[in-house]
Image: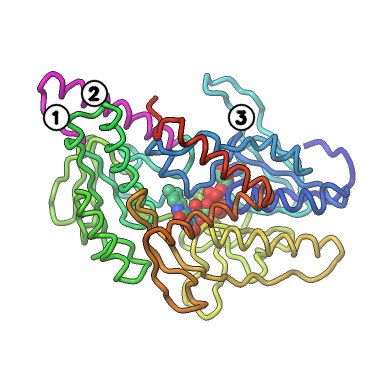
């Protein structure tokens, strides 16, 4: 990128839960007074907070939750550049960005490189397919908004077909299989169930009882990262909704029409969603010698710095130590939010040669939303031991995680106004997207 001035350049790659919050706060603190130039690079033009993607997939998310990066950059004194990072040259302090191609195949922006003085890697994670046969070809993923929108379109088409078949007395069934019984798989199954009921209300789904949802999970229980009483409560709720749970089943092969498990069972499935674990992108294996772990995450120290003092990493793509625990900080939105706050302080200090600030993960617990049916989880994590909550209170706490993200992007006043306007809008718009 052409250099317009000699300001210190902080290049943030990835504008997700972590990167966009960081770009926004640094823009206000360092960009506005002209202390540093803040540049955010993202492969997409818009931002949707990733934990909402199962709602995008189910068609229940309001389109207004999508944020234009350019507008956010303009309001918060940072620059946004569209592009997908593909390589790094640490000697010249440059990242390489692949050409940007339009949907019609036209090259909009040629390959280019961006110089940095400080680089922040915040590109998140992708699904880990564990090289299982057929997953890449036949499954859908919820890694990006565009994939979630694609799933939603398939779902609506399938429901329209099912409805027409029912009217012709053709008793077909639509089977949806979700592989992975962690929070993503569980939340998606509840959302899909809710959608099938709303479709019935809208008269698009006589015969909606013909939609079958199955979760296939390798461990003996759903939500294995949460206490077992929460798993049991969740399992009971899903079974009550008619979701078929296949626990202790390892997927070994996927075809266009079915899923095969290790014990030889063949489970028919029209739509298949893979939600069984994450890894950082494979191109991290070739990041000019930076150390990665077995799931490709960049190894960082307590202040989120890689072995290169000019390069930091945060969010899902970083392997950050969690003192007192064998495992690293978990790949969660709450960790991404906290890390953005800490790294902001470190990068502000860096401008005046002050020391970095250490990041300590505060586990406020985990909540899993079962749509309108309930929310289950434990709050305060290791601060107060495990306190389990459910029902309305859990729903409020669950939503507060998103509110914290919005507050980091827009401030508290605008977040309150947004929440109120969404409440009003929900009374007039359709509860799901039907196109
Ligand atoms: C369906 C679902 C539900 C979830 N629910 C919860 C929850 O309830 N609670 C919770 O704590 N966590 C939840 N998570 C996990 C949470 O979303 C992630 O931990 C969090 O988003 C990580 O933030 P991040 O900034 O590291 O990455 P992301 O938020 O994924 O952002 C990464 C950004 O990098 C961009 N990018 C990727 N590659 C490139 C590239 N090569 N060049 C340029 N830009 C690039 C992407 O476009 C994206 O904007 C959920 C995840 C999913 C998928």
Q: Is residue 285 visible?
A: no
Query: Would you name the residue on which mark 3 appears?
Result: 100
Quarter of the view holding residue 81: top right
Give residue 30's position: percent from left, percent from top: 82, 52
Q: Is residue 327 or residue 372 the one in the foreground? A: 372
Query: How is the model colour-coded?
Result: rainbow
Magenta-drawn segment: 147-174
Tell me the tag on residue 161. 2
Query: Would you name the residue on which mark 1 appears?
Result: 172
Is the C-beta separation of discs 1 and 2 under 8 Å? yes
Dot 3 falls on a residue whose secondary structure is strand
Give residue 8's position: percent from left, percent from top: 84, 51
Residue at figure coordinates x 31%, y 56% from the top left = 181
Residue at figure coordinates x 88%, y 48% from the top left = 34
* First along the sequence among labels 3 and 2: 3
- Label 3, label 2: how many angstroms apart (C-alpha)? 36 Å
Please identify, in this view, whether the residue under mark 1 or under mark 3 is nearer the observer.
Answer: 1
Q: Is residue 408 or residue 273 the one in the foreground? A: 408
* First along the sequence among labels 1 and 3: 3
């Amino acid at each position: 990128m052409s250099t317009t001035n000699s300001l210190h350049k902080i290049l943030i790659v990835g504008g997700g839960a972590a990167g966009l919050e960081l770009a926004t706060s640094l823009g206000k603190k360092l960009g506005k007074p002209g202390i540093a130039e803040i540049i955010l690079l993202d492969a997409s033009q818009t931002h949707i907070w990733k934990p909402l993607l199962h709602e995008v997939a189910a068609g229940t998310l309001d389109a207004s939750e999508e944020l234009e990066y350019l507008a956010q950059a303009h309001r918060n004194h940072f620059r946004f550049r569209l592009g997908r990072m593909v390589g790094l040259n640490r000697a010249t302090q440059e990242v390489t960005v692949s050409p940007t191609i339009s949907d019609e195949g036209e090259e909009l922006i040629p390959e280019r490189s961006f110089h940095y003085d400080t680089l922040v890697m915040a590109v998140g994670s992708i699904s880990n397919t564990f090289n299982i046969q057929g997953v890449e070809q036949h499954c859908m993923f919820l890694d990006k908004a565009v994939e979630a929108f694609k799933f939603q379109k398939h779902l609506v088409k399938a429901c329209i077909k099912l409805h027409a078949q029912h009217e012709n007395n053709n008793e077909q069934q639509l089977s949806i299989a979700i592989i992975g019984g962690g929070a993503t798989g569980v939340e998606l199954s509840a959302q899909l169930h809710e959608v099938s009921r709303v479709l019935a209300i809208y008269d698009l789904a006589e015969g909606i009882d013909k939609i079958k949802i199955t979760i296939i999970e390798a461990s003996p229980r759903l939500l294995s990262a949460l206490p077992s009483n929460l798993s049991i409560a969740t399992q009971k709720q899903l079974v009550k909704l008619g979701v078929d749970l296949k626990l202790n089943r390892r997927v070994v092969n996927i075809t266009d029409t079915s899923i095969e498990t290790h014990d030889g069972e063949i489970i028919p499935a029209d739509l298949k969603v893979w939600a069984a674990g994450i890894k950082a992108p494979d191109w991290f294996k070739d990041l000019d010698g930076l150390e990665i772990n077995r799931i490709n995450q960049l190894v960082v120290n307590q202040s989120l710095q890689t072995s290169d003092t000019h390069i930091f990493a945060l969010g899902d793509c970083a392997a950050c130590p969690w003192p007192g625990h064998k495992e690293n900080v978990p790949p969660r939105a709450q960790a991404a939010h906290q890390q953005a706050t800490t790294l902001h302080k470190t990068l502000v200090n860096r401008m005046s040669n002050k020391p970095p600030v250490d990041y300590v993960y505060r586990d406020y617990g985990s909540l899993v939303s079962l749509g309108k049916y309930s929310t289950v989880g434990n709050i305060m994590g290791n601060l107060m031991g495990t306190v389990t909550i459910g029902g309305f209170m859990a729903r409020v706490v669950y939503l507060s995680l998103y509110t914290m993200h919005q507050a980091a992007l827009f401030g508290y006043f605008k977040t309150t106004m947004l929440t109120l306007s969404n409440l009003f809008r929900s009374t007039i718009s359709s509860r799901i997207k039907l196109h």
